[in-house]
Image (tube, rainbow, N blue to C red):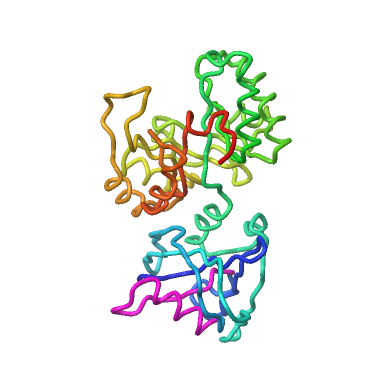
Amino acid sequence: MHIVAAAIIRDGKVLVARRHRDAHQGGLWEFPGGKVEPGEDAATALARELKEELGITVESATPLIEIPHDYADKSILLAVWQVNRFSGEARGCEGQPLAWVAIDELSQREFPQANLPVITALQLPPYYLITPDPAKEGELFMVRLEASLTAGVTLVQLRAKSLTRGEYKRLASRVKALCDRFGAALLLNSSAEMVVEVGADGLHLSGRELMSLGTRPLGRSYRLSASCHDAAELKQAGAIGIDFAVLSPVMPTHTHPGAETLGWQPFQQWVKAASLPVYALGGMTLEDLPTAQQAGAQGVAAIGALWGVKKL
């Protein structure tokens, strides 16, 4: 079943509706929308559904994320669009309760399982910074990290494979304090234990670590990301509840100039089948963001393109 839904945003809040008690997944909150009728495209269906359900006219909408999901009694493909401009005043034309909810408070409400990646996508930024080796950066590491945060980076992965556990923990504590100053989230490329010890916001898993797990290594109060390189790893990430993934390498990189790359067509195909937000990684620049998002990505992940930048 093909379903369209809308993340309607106004003043930093998202409009959600409560499903009628006698409906499928009744009583839960959802993003307004409905079924795509035979012969309709998704954009047409979205405009029709929002007019029927809310009495509004869509003026500007862009694809946000597509989620295939299997419930016990049905399988759906949920295509979610972000609506940033509309005319009319939203009301529950079918008697459904409505609420405008702050994006960072969406997780406090009960939604159908298929909506959870949508909430994550709304809360994630378009850029994901992966730090370079601190040993090569020396004293400039913290200076350049602060520059990236000043430019607007709000999601950071601390990758420091050359450090001992003690060195990494000391650096992670400093990086966490700096990220806190800028309101940025810090994910550690380390262990779940280290995340708890440092008080970081989450954990990044390698592809090997991802494939060795049967469940999430940390609770839902933490962000979990994972490195993926093929459709099987993306499927595993979705199966164990990883919040988002990076898929690489999309394009050639300076560090691995001869490595085989995915290209945008396979990237788009694999992301379309994924059940979680995905960042494009590998040879990405700031200019690649529109291309990545057109291919279904949440955004771009990068080291060099986001490291020490003056602005995004």
Q: Nearer the viewer, residue 23 or 164?
A: 164
| Magenta stretch: includes residue 123 | no
Where is residue 208? Give x, y as percent.
39, 30
As displayed, is residue 309 above or below residue 254? Answer: below
Q: Nearer the viewer, residue 77 or 256?
A: 256
Q: Name the quadrant of the N terminus.
A: bottom left
Q: Nearer the viewer, residue 74 or 204?
A: 204
Where is residue 104? Give x, y as percent.
66, 54
Residue under the point 34% across and 34% down:
249
| Magenta stretch: includes residue 33 | yes
Q: Is residue 144 left or right of residue 256?
A: right
Farthest front residue in view: 310
Q: Name the quadrant of the C terminus.
A: top right
As displayed, is residue 39 above or below residue 229? Answer: below
Q: Which residues are magenta?
A: 29-53
Query: How many dots with numbers?
Result: 0
Residue under the point 34% across and 79% down:
37
As displayed, is residue 289 above or below residue 61? Answer: above
Where is residue 57? Give x, y as percent.
52, 79
As displayed, is residue 62 above or below residue 234? Answer: below
Residue under the point 45% across and 45% down:
240
